[in-house]
Image (cartoon, rainbow, N blue to C red):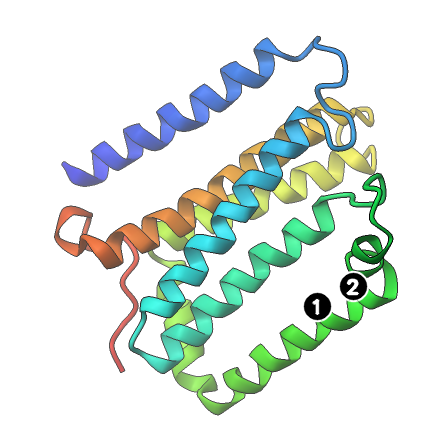
Amino acid sequence: MKNTSWGVLLIIVLGINTVVWLGLKNRPGISAENGPMENFQAVCLAISFLLWLTASLRSKNYSETILLSALALFSLTFLILEVDTRSFDAQLFNKLFNGKIRNAWLGALWLVVGLFFSRSAKLTWAGFRHWMKTWSGILMVVSGAFWIASGLIDKGIVGQKDFYHEELMETYATLLMALSAGLFLANQLFPNDLPPKSANLPSN
């Protein structure tokens, strides 16, 4: 019954997302750079980052903490790459979040995560595989499918290149990323109120 309830809630959320953006389709600038659709995506990615970060700080399991930290950094990376800061009138800010400097510090963060992962690779990888089978993991996988669809539209491989439909796919992708993180954290806080397979990683 709980599984059905969560499935219905997911359909409702995605349905609302569809109705809202289809209703605004002809609004000028809706899919423009730093426009409403991209701002929505940025908010979802920021929420996803904060929720994964919170979950990692709450975790008392080393390998789980590494996995959750990687997911937080994954969301942060998408956020930084998606938001175009070049239009901001802040020279230092633009240098930090664009080009080689951005790539250097982002790469350094991933290197740190990789080093911690290497200390518990077997357990962390096992936790990752388990998580991929949970509701939280499944939502993240589906979000990846929408990212791929967005890329195919951007390249003109699927239909004609269309900024609106490209951004629409990305609204689904980022919304699902936020829902994935939210479901995991909710299961940490209220484990008895969610389906058994919602997002618990095995204790090691």
- Residue under the image location 42 percent in, 54 percent down: 51
159 over 135 or under it: above or below: above
Indicate left or right for 145 with 82 as reference: left
Q: From this view, report whether residue 139 is shown above or below residue 32.
A: below
Residue that mark 1 sits on: 106
Image mark for residue 102:
2
- The residue positioned 73% from the left and 51% from the top of the image is 81
| Residue at mark 2 to residue at mark 1: CA–CA distance | 6 Å
Foreground pick, 71 / 87:
87
Residues packed near mark 1 inside 10 Å, few (<14), some (14 to 19) or many (20 plus): some
> Which percent across, then down, holds residue 123?
38, 83
Residue 185 seen in this snapshot: yes
- Residue kind at label 2, given as amino acid type: Arg
Residue kind at label 1, given as amino acid type: Leu
Task: State if disc 1 and disc 2 touch (CB < 8 Å).
Answer: yes
Which of the two residues, 118 or 132, is positioned nearer the viewer here?
Answer: 118
Regarding residue 197, the answer to whether it shows in the image is no
Mark 2 crowdedness (10 Å alpha carbons): few <14, some 14-19, many ≥20: some
Question: Where is the N terminus found, in terms of image quarters?
Answer: top left
Most distant residue in the bottom direction: 119
Residue drawn where x is 77% and y is 57% of the image? 97
- Residue 160 shows which numbered tag? none
Q: Give the percent coordinates (x, y) of residue 5.
A: 22, 32
Residue 120 is situated, as x and y percent measured from the top left of the image, at: 44, 87
Image quadrant in which the C terminus is located: bottom left
| Element carrying mark 1 | helix
Question: Relative to 146, is 197 on the left or the right?
Answer: left
Task: Give whichever of 3, 172 is nearer the camera.
Answer: 172
Front-lying residue, 47 or 174: 47
Q: Which secondary structure, mark 2?
A: helix
Report the number of numbered marks: 2
